[in-house]
Image: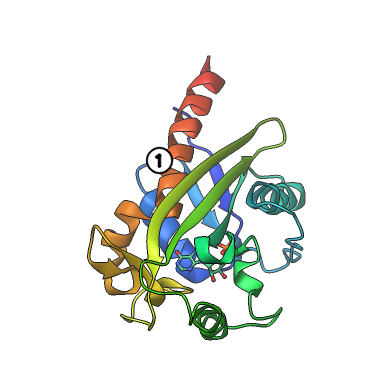
Amino acid sequence: MGRIRIVLATRNEDKVRELRAILADLPVEIVSATEFRDLPPVEENGATLEENALLKARAVHRFLGLPALADDTGLEVDALGGRPGVYSSRFAGEQATYEDNVRKLLEELKDVPDGRTARFRCVAAFVDGETELLAEGVCEGQILHEPRGTGGFGYDPVFYVPEKGKTFAEMTLEEKNRISHRSRAFQRMKELLEQYLRRDKR
Ligand code: IMP
């Protein structure tokens, strides 16, 4: 199988760490977008996770001329009709911190009783100028009333996974990576990339 360089289209170091671990055994060289200082920021103005993931991967591919992988994640809360969804990073405003977003989520849910079902949905996109691949991963859980745990990032302290009896923030990176939306999307993407690289060699 040919060894190609793929740029991960993200500057989020938390994510780079997770994705490097997930993709470690793929026969490709993974480079982080943080290594390219002059990459212009991409406006994530798509209406869906698919559109945003493709926007990011296409922009990086266009700018660097290298195959690019991007992802977009949304937290879908049933009691909020699927919000914040594609707006998860901006839930409490354009400059919102992770804490601001969690606070807003708990505030909006304050009158909703236990068992507040939700899911993280992640879409991964690969773009190399000829081929575009999309893969989705989902992780089901519930939103707690108060944060628990110190690991992870984003909504992790309030995202509880009943089968594990823990929030994402109470799991080690390895535990989270075994079941997370992002790892599921990228496991699937890994299969698609393996097929794609094999086809390329024929
Ligand atoms: P992004 O599309 O991966 O940047 O994710 C959008 C937003 O969803 C982030 O700003 C986080 O608030 C949240 N998010 C994404 N992935 C996770 C995760 O694994 N745990 C907790 N929050 C996440």
- Image quarter of the N terminus: top left
**Residue at (48% x, 82% y) in the render:** 110
Which amino acid does the dot numbered 1 rest on? Leu
Tell me residue 22's x, y (percent). 38, 51
180 over 99 or under it: above or below: above
**Residue at (22% x, 66% y) in the render:** 165
Q: Is mark 1 within 8 Å of ligand 1?
A: no
Tell me residue 188's x, y (percent). 44, 38
Please tell me in which quadrant of the rendered image residue 37 appears.
Answer: bottom right
Please tell me in which quadrant of the rendered image residue 91 appears.
Answer: bottom right
Q: Is residue 176 left or right of residue 101?
A: left
Q: Nearer the viewer, residue 74 or 10?
A: 74
Tell me residue 179's x, y (percent). 33, 53
**Residue at (53% x, 55% y) in the render:** 31
Q: Is residue 58 left or right of residue 10?
A: right
Tell me residue 144's x, y (percent). 37, 75
Q: Which residue is mark 1?
A: 26
Q: Is residue 8 left or right of residue 130?
A: left
48 over 187 or under it: above or below: below
